[in-house]
Amino acid sequence: MKKVAFVSSFALVAAAQAAVLFDNGPVYDVAGSPNLSRLISPNTTLGAGAQISANNAVADNFTASSSWNVTKLTFYMYQTGAASTFTFTGLNYQICTSNSDAISWTAGSISNGGLVAYRVGSVTTDRTRAIFAIDVAVNLNIGPGNYILRWQAAGTLASGPWQPPVVPTNGGGNATQSLAGGAFNPLVDGGTAAAALELPFTISGTEIPAPGALALMGTGALIAARRRR
């Protein structure tokens, strides 16, 4: 009789590939070489200030539809003058449940996720605002519910970091901004106060099966092992 090793349900879960669990919206609206995030008149806000040096920050909400093991947060930001160079040196983040929660930053370990697009004006197509993906490795367990993700970043250039909005900017967003460590208030476009902004970010990891599902996985693995004897 051939001996078959039992594969635990926890090993099966750990082996699952990380995937995007939440995507808060498109970074660019003009696909090409390069991709462009275009400001459309009458909107005037190219990006919102989220500089660690000035203690400015931005935030937006997300919903976890199930329990998650989060392994990566990805933010999309630019510094004016960075034509094609990753100039970011740090990023702070916080996950909370209400805008009334006190600010309490965690310093993330960042890596270059690649140049995603250029933020450009409504009539200009200059390549001075390179939007990069800023990857932050984390290890967080989040249960089902509604949350707010806050962040601020640092870089080597004088202008920025800046946070571009989800495009196209059509209003209806619920992003917020904190200036100089103050309260988080609604973030709206400078040209049309009716255009409430939404901010792009992605959350990656794996779903955590409910206890009942884990039990079923373990039973299934055991049955399969017995059948192969």
Image (cartoon, grey):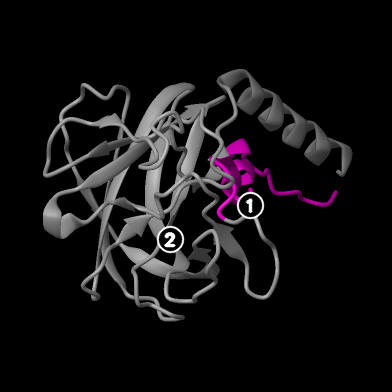
Mark 2: secondary structure = strand
Relative to 102, residue 123 above or below = below
Q: What element does badge 1 sit on?
A: loop
- Label 1: which residue? 17
Instruction: Answer whether residue 226 is magenta in the image.
Output: no
Mark 1: amino acid: Gln
Q: Earlier in the sequence, mark 2 or mark 1?
A: 1
Residue 198 horizontal/vertical position (percent): 47, 38
Q: Amino acid at mark 2?
A: Asp
- Residue in view at x 23 percent, y 75 percent: 156
- Circle 1 packing at 10 Å, graded few (<14), some (14-19), many (20+), is few
Question: Residue 109, relative to residue 22: is it above or below?
Answer: below
Q: Is residue 209 left or right of residue 111?
A: right
Q: Residue at x 56, y 24 (%)?
A: 65
Query: Pointer 2: residues within 10 angstroms few (<14), some, or many (20+)?
Result: many
Q: Nearer the viewer, residue 13 or 176?
A: 176
Mark-to-mark CA distance, 2 and 1: 17 Å
Residue 122, picture quadrant: bottom right
In the image, the segment drawn in magenta is 1-27
Q: Residue 214: x, y in percent?
A: 62, 27
Q: Residue at x 34, y 35 (%)?
A: 187
Task: Check residue 207 in the rendering and tell me which mark sits there, or answer none.
Answer: none
Image disc number at residue 135 = 2
State the residue in front, 163 or 18: 163
Q: Position of residue 38 (x, y in %)?
A: 56, 57
Nearer to us of marks 2 and 1 is 2
Q: Quadrant of the C terminus?
A: top right
As for residue 26 lying within the magenta part, the answer is yes
Left or right of 39 in this view: 46: left
